[in-house]
Amino acid sequence: MSDNSLTTFLSVAWESASAAGEIIRARWQEPRSIEYKGAIDLVTSVDRESEQKIVEILQHHFPGHAILAEEEMTTEGKTGEYRWIIDPLDGTTNFAHGYPHVAVSIALEKSDEVILGLVYDPLRRECFRAVKGQGATLNGAPIRPSATGELEKSLLATGFPYDRRENADQYLAFFKAFLTRCQGIRRNGAAALDLCYVASGRLDGFWELKLKPWDVAAGALIVTEAGGSMSDFSGARFSLDGNETLASNSLIHPEMVDVLSSAARLHID
Ligand code: IPD
Ligand code: CA
Ligand code: CA
């Protein structure tokens, strides 16, 4: 059993993310075994294998900690101070199609506050990491968001929730509003990496609806620790359990809030 020190948390988080990354890399060339959670919401055997490996390592070191994991290994109830929040494979649709943009996301909460976040892209071998109050890094080097000061010069990203067939108009209203106001929009298919790309200046902003805590827990800490901003679409406090995720380099945050607010009003009218 391990101690509850930050150094141990960091080394065990990395041990589990790198083991999961090994699995994703090893299985990349193999045929996919795909099941459907919904019409377009997939899960592969690799999502499950990755989750099992991460949870096995975390439980070995921290048997008393709670787990919130996307697939099936969430522990019952929420006991104790510590909870690990895990997306074992962010970008499952990408993985299923062999589109090389996926990640493993692991965060640790202490008394309901995320204190550590790690997002690992196993194909590029990029590890984004943040510790509450201690900044954010990419493969050990400090990262900062971009210095882009205007929405017009910004590269943004977004994603679409799995109920997009039912709510396409709402999602397209936000997309359309940004399309005419920024330099470009990407839809890369892994929200945890979208957040890390905002944190490291590769993107200037990101918005998405209905993300789950495992999509955003690690990435949101990485954004704020790098010096970026997180909020809901109205600019109010970001919550892991909320419906709205807005991330930016801070500078374009007010403009992004304006666009989202006017698009929301238009959609309602
Ligand atoms: C999805 C990805 C995608 C986002 C979806 C998420 P998954 O996670 O992050 O970019 O648009 O909303 O659910 O299912 O690949 O882990
Ligand atoms: Ca995800
Ligand atoms: Ca996932």
Image (cartoon, rainbow, N blue to C red):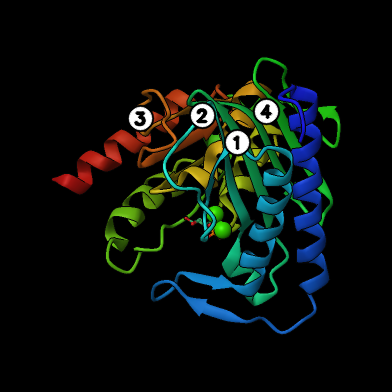
Residue type for callout 3: Asp
Quick one: SS at disc 2? Answer: loop
Task: Name the residue carrying label 3.
Answer: 258
Residue type for callout 1: Gly
Residue type for callout 4: Pro
Q: Does the residue labelled 2 lie within 8 Å of ligand 3?
A: no
Q: Where is residue 241 in the image (x, y as percent from the top left)?
A: 39, 38
Q: Position of residue 264 (x, y in %)?
A: 26, 41
Q: Position of residue 178 (x, y in %)?
A: 43, 44
N-term-proximal mark, 3 vs 4: 4
Visible in this render: residue 204? no
Q: Where is residue 105 in the image (x, y as percent from the top left)?
A: 64, 46
Foreground: disc 3 or disc 2: 2
Residue type for callout 2: Gly
Labels 3 and 4 touching (C-beta < 8 A): no
Label ID, residue 80? 2
At horizontal 68% and vertical 29% (from top left) the residue drawn is 146
Other-residue count near label 2 (Cα within 10 Å), few / some / many at <14 / 14–19 / ≥20: few
- Viewer-side residue, 157 vs 5: 5
Q: How far, Cα to Cα, is label 2 from label 4?
A: 34 Å
Q: How far, Cα to Cα, is label 3 from label 1?
A: 44 Å
Q: How far, Cα to Cα, is label 4 from label 1?
A: 36 Å
Quadrant containing ligand 3: bottom right
Label ID, residue 145? 4
Label ID, residue 64? 1
N-term-proximal mark, 2 vs 4: 2
Left or right side of 208 for 200:
right
Other-residue count near label 4 (Cα within 10 Å), few / some / many at <14 / 14–19 / ≥20: many
Other-residue count near label 1 (Cα within 10 Å), few / some / many at <14 / 14–19 / ≥20: some
